[in-house]
Image (cartoon, rainbow, N blue to C red):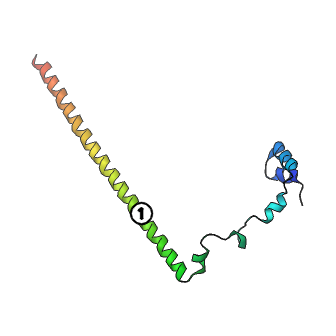
Amino acid sequence: MACPSVAAARLGLGLWGARTVQARGYNLEYSRQFSSKAGDDMGRSAGAIREAGGAFGQREKAEEDRYFREKSKEQLASLRKHHQEEIMHHEKEIQRLQKEIERHKNQMKKLKDD
């Protein structure tokens, strides 16, 4: 088993981190025994029922697919609404600018006539 300061140095904790590990008496090797690793039975995911297969797994997959289809529809509807609002805003801005152009043309015409 490695000394806590060696383990702290491996983790990149620096001098104060190593002293903290020593002072508190952490046993890093002990904590590694209970950490989940890839391929470890202790690190099972929440989708264990789905992975087991059968009717429950098929139902779970169908529910997930339905949920994501609904989410996609909601996002598309929101995006369409946003684009429609943007189009309306730009059309109003175009109308405002056209009125400004006409106003300036009229002012120029008045100056020309004077």
Residue in view at x 63 percent, y 69 percent: 45
Which one is in front, 95 or 74? 74
Q: Percent x, y for residue 99?
A: 19, 33
Looking at the image, is 91 positioned above or below residue 57?
above
Looking at the image, is 45 positioned above or below residue 24?
below
Q: Residue 33's quadrant in the figure?
A: bottom right
- What residue is pinned by disc 1? 72
Left or right of 105? Residue 75 is right
Q: Quadrant of the C terminus?
A: top left
Residue furthest to the top in view is: 114
Viewer can see residue 40:
no
Q: Percent x, y for residue 101?
A: 20, 31
Residue in view at x 13 percent, y 23 percent: 109
Looking at the image, is 100 positioned above or below residue 36?
above
Residue in view at x 21 percent, y 31 percent: 100
Left or right of 97? Residue 72 is right
- Residue type pointed to by label 1: Ser
